[in-house]
Image (cartoon, rainbow, N blue to C red):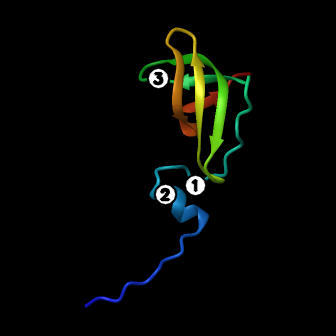
Amino acid sequence: MADNKNIELNDEMAASAVGGTQNTITPFDPGEEVWIIGDEELIKGKIVTGQIIDHYNAKYDVLHVDEGIIRNYPHHMLRKRH
């Protein structure tokens, strides 16, 4: 019978396991204007709320210009609008 052992993941390993980036993120603030990365274009959006998961992952509710609020949108699919 195999021994069950607990494995402790560091932040980088945990980020990889949940599909996040290995780079530390800079969270978006509510009200901040962002680009939503679509299939073929960038779409204007605005952050409504955010949930920081760890140093590498966050999810946001984003106000989409045409479709209303998109819930739980991943950080890596957004870009800051300048």
| Label 1 vs 2, first from the N-terminus | 2
Q: CA distance from mark 2 to mark 3?
A: 23 Å
77 and 9: which one is in front?
9
Closer to us: 61 or 17: 61
In which quarter of the view is residue 65 placed?
top right
Q: Which residue is mark 1?
A: 22
Label 3 near label 1: C-beta < 8 Å?
no
Which disc number belongs to residue 16? 2
Q: Which secondary structure lies at badge 3?
A: loop
Looking at the image, the residue that sits furthest to the top is 66
Q: Element type at marker 1?
A: loop
Amino acid type assigned to the residue bearing label 3 in the image: Gly
Q: Are marks 1 and 2 in contact (CB under 8 Å)?
A: yes
Precedes in sequence: disc 1 or disc 3: 1
Q: Kindly identify which residue carries mark 3.
A: 38
Q: Residue 6: percent from the left, percent from the top? A: 47, 80
